[in-house]
Structure formats: structure tokens, C-alpha cells
Image (cartoon, rainbow, N blue to C red):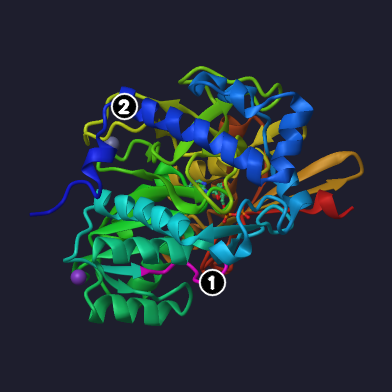
Amino acid sequence: MEKKYFQPEIETMPVEEIKKLQEEKLLKQVKYVYENNKYYKKLMDEKGVKPEDIKCLADLSKLPFLTKNDLREAYPYGLLSRPLSDCVRIHSTSGTTGKRVVAFYTQNDIDIWEECCARAIVAAGGSENDVCQVAYGYGLFTGGAGLHGGSHKVGCLTLPMSSGNTERQVQFMQDLDATILCCTPSYAAYIGEKIEEMGIKPEDLKLKAGIFGAEPWTEEMRRSIEKSLGIKAYDIYGLTEISGPGVSFECEAQSGMHINEDHFIAEIIDPETGEVLPEGQEGELVFSSIDKEAFPLLRYRTRDLCVLTREKCSCGRTHVKMCKPKGRSDDMLIIRGVNVFPSQIETVLLKKGYTPNYQIIVDRIGNEDTFDINVELSEENYKKIHAADNEEASERDLVNAMKTMLGIRPKIHLLAPKSIVRSEGKAVRTIDKRKLH
Ligand code: ADP
Ligand code: K
Ligand code: ZN
């Protein structure tokens, strides 16, 4: 029989029990970190907090925050809490927003992380009867290693493809009857495109599910990938600093990701004041890892903007759910004084029938911000628009739709098919040339 949960007793544990478990682990962890990590001890001392002051879950908010700047300052060993002889692995962030930071793992840390990924795979319908194609990058990036380990734990036949070499990717998918695909959503979209180009129909594949994450993607993008690959597409979230993918994952309800609360405590804070916000309000996501050994971060500010909800989920899991992060506070562009998220642009493009291949270029000329969006046309759209000599009208229509969504008017440039470079990992959507001046 197909398993519905990887660890049912934990994944469906009554909320009160989860909170009790979190409290026990938190108290122990604060003491452990205080005694084993000079960097965090100093932050606690500066704030005048002692481990004894943390007596219950609500006391969490007394602890100091950690930020990416702390990680950079403490690089490489400052936030390590174990002797290196106890550690077995290093990973590093993708460096999307600056200098990379490194994280360390003991064998126990790896086991827990892989279990979290195994929960995600089982939630997507995975079992020992599946062939799981891992097309996240292998190496320093956590994507490949995390899902690879999770796939093993579930007992799937694991296909460790890593990213890239897309034709071979599709060839193996077909020849070896892969049923689950794990990669970034932008790479999944590219694989979908490649399949069509190779004359393969989604029905010709055995693929049934995809586990996509590591970058923001919209609901519109989800539908487009589900169609092009003939699958159900599940979201997965995580960050290197806290372990990697699998901090949270989507279930069959596809309406937010369950956070693995037996290992991580999530808070939402006001990014300006640092104040904890009540459930249901949007703010910055903060994580405390309550049983990590090598690199146990407390109150780590992710900069991801998000909402938490504890509404009952139809899948039976009891762990709190986070919405799709809208993007990082640092993905947000301020153009002519207006906040713009790349995800808003993606939504408009896909709703209007364009491809998810686009690029945002922002610059400043004199005192004014320039705002351009390059949008690649599909073969079909390209032919249609050119046959009807409709280019200007199409651009105007898209400018207006963007104005409605964003409040400001971009310049739109419709480009020929295949003119924007595809991503095999995390897509680079924005070029902000203002930073170069
Ligand atoms: P970097 O911070 O250098 O990109 P990571 O590879 O550790 O390093 O990336 C973690 C970040 O990726 C998260 O903080 C988040 O911004 C983003 N991310 C991961 N998974 C998702 C997801 N499912 N949806 C949106 N963003 C995600
Ligand atoms: K198997
Ligand atoms: Zn659920």
C-alpha cells in the first residue's frame, strides 16, 4: 500500500504535542548554543539574556536575531558549535544576494535533513516504486544533496542527474521511466520546452509529480509546468543556513508548505521593528533550528516575506503552513519609488499567454529610473504577432496590464523565440544596473 506520510506519528502529531516537543528542544538548544558558540553567546550577553531566561516557547522572542551579515562576519567557523572532527559535510548558499556563506553538518544533521526531504517526496506521492530524477545541481548547493538523500530514504530508485545537459536529461527520463522530477521551477519549465522541441508528448512520459523549489515561482508558473510535463507540481522550500530544501514542503492540497515543526520553529516578524506578528499577517520569516548540532542557528532572519497559517489541512498533517514566499525582501525592486516584485511581472506575463522567459532591466538616467522588461515570445505568438503586424499593439496591451498590476509603466520589448538564456538552476530575472553606477 502507498504510504501517505513518511513519519506519520510526527507529521500528524496533535498541535499541543508538537508545541511541547518544540519547547523541550528549544530549552535544551539555547543552553547548548550558549555553551558551545561564542558568537551567539556574545549576542545573548549583549542583550542581557541568559539560557535560564528561556523557560517556554513564548520566551523565544527574548533571544537576539541572527542575520546573513552575522554569517558573513562569522565566516567560516564563527557559528560552528561542534568540533570539526564531529562534522561530516559542508554546503554553501548559492550566493544569490552576495558573498556565499557556509554551513556545517554532523551525520545526525544530515539524517534529519534527508528525512525532511523524504517527507516531501512521500507527500508528492513518492514510494519505493518510484524513479526519482534529481535534476537540482549537485555539489556545494544543497538542492541536489538534499533531495538525493531524501529519495534514498524513501527507497525510490534515485537518478542523480544533477542539472544541465537537458537533452540527456529528457532521454534518461524517457528511457528509465522517471516518475518524479526534482529541480528548480525555472529548470522544469525549460525541460518542458525541450520535451516539446524533441517531439515528445507529456503522455509519452511516466512522470507524475515534480518537486520544485529553491526560487520563487507563481501559481501561473505552476499551472504552466503541470501542463507541459503532464504532472502535479509541488513546492518545496528551504535555505542552506537552516539545512537546505525540506524546511517546508507542499502536500496534496497544494495550498502552502508544511514546516517541519519538530525541527524548526517559525516566526513572522515586522522587518522594520523586529516585533513578532500574529498568525495570518505578512512579514519576514524567522527560523530557529532546535535540534541541529553543527550549525544551530537561533532566530535566523531569512528575509523571505511570508504568511503562516495553522488552519486544518485536508492532508491530515498538523504542522503549520507557510504561503509561497512572495520573494525576498532583497528581490524587491524599488523603481520610481514603487515596490516591484519579479513575481508580479511573472503573473501578468503568464496570464496574458506569454512565456515565463523574461528579464527585468532597471537603470537610472539622470534622476530618473528606467524600467524595461524583455519578454520572449513563443514560436506561435511570434508568428501570430508578425503575421498581423501587431507588435506595437501587443506591447501596448502588456504595458497597460503591467501598469494595472504594478502602478508604474515599464517599456516592453517583445523578443524572438529562444533569445533569453535558459536557467538550469536559479533563474536570474533582474539586472539592476543602478547598483553599478
Ligand atoms: P541563496 O540565499 O544564496 O540563494 P540558498 O540556495 O540557500 O542560498 O537559497 C535559499 C533561498 O532561496 C531562500 O531564502 C528563499 O529566498 C529561496 N527559496 C527557496 N525555496 C523557495 C521556494 N520554494 N519558493 C520561493 N523561494 C524559495
Ligand atoms: K526502489
Ligand atoms: Zn497538508
98 or 240, which is in the foreground? 240
Residue 177 x/y as whole percent: 21, 74
Q: Give the overall secondary structure of the magenta segment.
A: loop
Q: Is residue 148 magenta?
A: no
Local secondary structure at mark 2 = helix
The residue at 51%/68% (across/down) is 424
Q: Which residues are magenta?
A: 134-140
Residue 199 x/y as whole percent: 30, 76
- The residues tagged by marks 2 and 1 sit, at their Cα atoms, a distance apart of 37 Å
The answer to which quarter of the image holds residue 94 is: bottom right
Specify whether 326 is left or right of 69.
left
Residue 400 appears in the picture as rendered: no
Specify the quarter for ligand 2.
bottom left
Specify whether 337 is left or right of 54.
right
The residue at 32%/81% (across/down) is 171
Residue 41 x/y as whole percent: 71, 38
Residue 234 x/y as whole percent: 34, 49
Specify whether 188 is left or right of 318.
right
Q: Which mark is residue 163?
A: none
Q: Amino acid at mark 2?
A: Glu
The residue under label 2 is 17
The residue under label 1 is 139
Name the N-terminal-most of marks 2 and 1.
2
Q: Is residue 138 magenta?
A: yes
Q: Badge 2: few (under 14), some or many (20 or more) residues near its Cα, within 10 Å?
A: few
Q: Amino acid at mark 1?
A: Gly
Of labels 2 and 1, the one closer to you:
2
232 or 293, which is in the foreground? 293
Specify whether 221 is left or right of 172.
right
